[in-house]
Structure formats: C-alpha cells, structure tokens
C-alpha cells in the first residue's frame, strides 16, 4: 500500500516495497575544515547542522528495513577519473589530490573522504564512490537499483544545489519518483538551498517533491 507524505507541490506517494534512501556525500571533505569544501573557499561549519536530522532519517529507513544508498564524491589516487577541468577549479593553492589536513583532498580511502561517524554506513547498505556531482555518472548505480526493483528515491545530503540537485535531476530523467527531505540537506549558501527547493517543486514538481523530516516520519510511523 502506498504511503501518502504531505509534501510540495502535492502529496508524495511513497511505495514502501520500492523505495530507497539516498544520502549524498555526507563525508568529512564537505563538513569539516581541511577538506574539499574548505579548499573551495566555503565556510563548512553550517553543514554540520543537518547531521542529526540525517541520522534520524537513516534510522527511519533502518527501522523499516528499506534500502539505503550512501554516496561519496571520490576520485582514484591516480586521478584517472578526475577531469583536468574539474581539478583546475577552486583556490589555486589546494586542488583535488593535493595533501590537506585530512589527507589528499577528495581521494578515495583518505581520512577526509570518510562519511562522518554519526552517519556511518552499516553492513548491507550500499556505498558508492562517484567521480562526478551526480550519483549516476560512472557509478553503475542505476543498474543496481533497477535489479532490486527500486522506483522511488528519497534524497538527503550535501550540498543541496550541487550534488543533491544533480543526482535528483539525473534520477528524475531515469524515471525515479524523487523526494527531497528539506531539513536533511544543506548548502554553504542558504539562498541556493531555498532556490533549489523552489526549482524542484515548481511547474507541478518538474524535478520531484520536497517534504519535511517530520512529515515523512509521521506518515510512515
Ligand atoms: N561545492 C559544493 O557545493 N559541492 C560539491 O562540490 N560537491 C557536493 O555537493 N557533494
């Protein structure tokens, strides 16, 4: 039976048999000083605030036994999957692959590339390293989700207008019914988060739906 979640632009019909949670890039690189977010010139501290809400969302999916996908923005140590155009961005002094205070910036396996402890993936949950902003680019995740019959994706993570929005748009184009949980996502730029939410729900939900964590929790419970 479908579960109706109060959402914008109108209620989201969550299909409990076919829904996965996608937690985008809740890794130290974006949330703690010395990582990629910091290297781009951002004040990273404001992203920490969504960790408790994101943990509550993960907990909801764990209690229901629904699948969870965690992503990390990560490149191979030899940078073979990092386009030079991507590496050239940011502050001239510190680029992807350079040594930062949490190891090499945005490189798989480095301390900074780990998901924050409070949201650490558990056995049986899917963890994907993605070289792009979107979760579908060069990851094979579409095939894995299709194999398990997933048709609905609930999104959380950082940053709202970059990797979350890109992933949600990629998912939308692949036919998934997408819901963003607005208090479990954050941006370095409050105005960009607000604008992203409006872009998603505009035009009758051109990209998908947006709901609060409490709306989701109360509807599912
Ligand atoms: N810079 C920024 O806002 N985000 C990223 O580079 N990656 C993600 O959003 N994960």
Image (cartoon, rainbow, N blue to C red):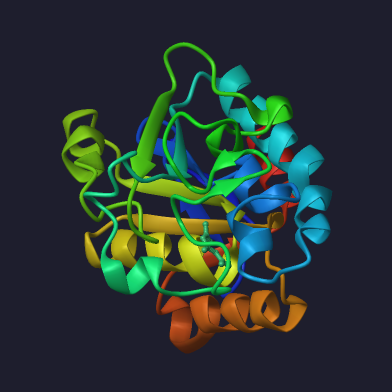
Q: Residue extending furthest bottom?
A: 203
At 34% from the left and 47% from the top, the residue drawn is 130
Q: Is residue 76 above or below residue 192?
A: above
At 69% from the left and 79% from the top, the residue drawn is 194
Q: Is residue 30 above or below residue 67?
A: below
Question: Is residue 134 in sight in this rendering?
Answer: yes
Question: Is residue 10 in sight in this rendering?
Answer: no
Counting from the top left corner in percent of width and height, residue 179 is at 51, 57
Q: Is residue 107 above or below residue 37?
A: above
Query: Image quadrant for the N terminus?
Result: top left
Counting from the top left corner in percent of width and height, residue 212 is at 72, 56
Front position in the image: 41 or 11: 41
The mark tally for this picture is 0
Front position in the image: 57 or 40: 40
Counting from the top left corner in percent of width and height, residue 154 is at 50, 48
At 54% from the left and 74% from the top, the residue drawn is 92
Q: Residue extending furthest top?
A: 123
Front position in the image: 155 or 210: 155
Front position in the image: 101 or 169: 101
Query: Image quadrant for the C terminus?
Result: top right
Image quarter of residue 2? top left
Image quarter of residue 145? top left
At 38% from the left and 66% from the top, the residue drawn is 87
Where ligand 1 lies, by quadrant? Answer: bottom right
Q: Is residue 86 above or below residue 194?
A: above
């Amino acid at each position: 039976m479908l579960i109706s979640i109060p959402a914008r632009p109108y209620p989201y019909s969550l299909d409990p048999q076919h829904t996965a949670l996608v937690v985008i890039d809740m890794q130290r690189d974006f949330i703690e000083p010395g990582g990629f977010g910091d290297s781009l010139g951002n004040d990273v501290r404001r992203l920490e605030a969504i960790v408790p809400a994101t943990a509550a969302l993960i907990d909801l999916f764990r209690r229901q036994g629904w699948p969870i996908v965690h992503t990390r923005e990560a490149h191979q140590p030899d940078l073979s999957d990092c386009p030079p155009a991507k590496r050239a961005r940011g502050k001239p002094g510190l680029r992807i692959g350079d040594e930062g205070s949490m190891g090499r910036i945005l490189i798989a396996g480095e301390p900074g590339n780990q998901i924050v402890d409070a949201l650490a993936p558990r056995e049986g949950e899917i963890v994907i390293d993605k070289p792009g902003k979107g979760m579908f680019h060069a990851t094979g995740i579409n095939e894995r989700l299709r194999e398990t019959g997933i048709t609905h994706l609930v999104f959380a993570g950082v940053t709202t207008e970059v990797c979350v929005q890109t992933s949600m748009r990629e998912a939308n184009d692949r036919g998934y019914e997408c819901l963003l949980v607005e208090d479990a996502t954050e941006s370095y730029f409050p105005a960009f988060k607000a604008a992203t939410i409006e872009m998603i729900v505009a035009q009758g939900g051109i990209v998908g739906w947006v709901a609060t964590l409490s709306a989701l929790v109360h509807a599912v419970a």
